[in-house]
Amino acid sequence: MRAPGIPVVGIPCDIFDKGLHPFHGVGEKYINAVAHGARALPLLIPGLGRGRDLEPIGSLLDMAGLLDSLDGIFLTGSPSNVEPARYGGEPSAPGTSHDPQRDATTLPLIRLALERGIPLFCVCRGMQELNVALGGTLHQRVQEVPGMMDHREDKHASRELQYAPAHEVIIEEGGVLAGLGIGSRHRVNSLHAQGVDRLAPGLRVEARAPDGLIEALSVEGSRALAFGVQWHPEWQLREHELSLALFGAFGAAVWSQYRGKDAKSA
């Protein structure tokens, strides 16, 4: 089922506990960014892995059929980290938050979306998922890697301070971000401990932090726009030129996908 007159962007949910019960949800700032930044209808996708209360939702859902009703996929940030077993990493430090149901949803969804030529925009954890889905690895604690900065936020600060610009990113020539035409250096927020270690085959570096950490990447030769950034452009996107440009480019790709489907069905 397609929404009349507007493209639909799927947003995979986080699975988290609220009291005694598990919930599936997406932060409001991500929903607003898709709605107002990309001018598309957000559609939340529940986690497909095995939960505590039910058999896997994936047993009831044809993921390829789901993509038939979507014009884009937006992968959000999250308090959880990709499980190290997904990329052959060492066991996580005690207390690390994971979301195996989200991993079970997003990693195959990324691969299928790329195969089907569905536009893909990945933020923070989402960018890490893109790298892992295509065979890359992650640093679990960037702050402990020699020569790297501490990219984490101050968890005791206000939300406004946590999302304040923290460091510069340098956009590389010839890529998707450079094609936005808004300059090569921008200050961005930084709220993560994980980061890209080994880049997956088929991915291109789009931007780096001053310490060399990959801050943005794209899929080379993809049938539709497919890229990710490590920072959070959804936060107060109207106040930042780069954020508006990123969601504008994603929105243009999503609308193109939508119109192309309508033309085929006409």
Image (tube, rainbow, N blue to C red):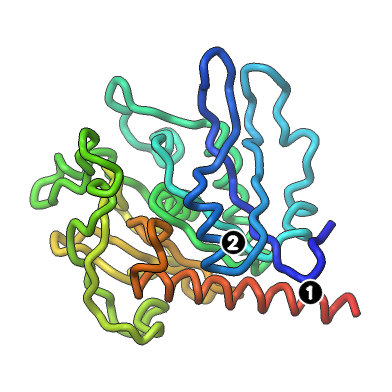
Which residue shows up at 27% across the image and 25% down it?
A: 93
Outermost residue, right direction? 266
Q: Are marks 2 and 1 in contact (CB under 8 Å)?
A: no
Residue 223 lies, in percent from the top left, at 61, 75
Which residue shows up at 77% across the image and 59% down it?
A: 69
Residue 122 lies, in percent from the top left, at 47, 58
Residue 58 lies, in percent from the top left, at 72, 36
The answer to which of 33 and 79 lies nearer the viewer is 33
Indicate the amino acid at tag 2.
Ala
Residue 201 lies, in percent from the top left, at 42, 62
Which numbered mark, 2 or 1, is in the foreground of this view? 2
Reply above or below: 5 against 26: below
User: Which residue carries the number 2 mark?
Assistant: 35
Point out which mark residue 261 bears. Answer: 1
* Chain-order first, disc 2 or disc 1: 2
The image quadrant that residue 179 belongs to is bottom left
Which residue shows up at 59% across the image and 75% down it?
A: 253
The answer to which of 133 and 77 lies nearer the viewer is 77
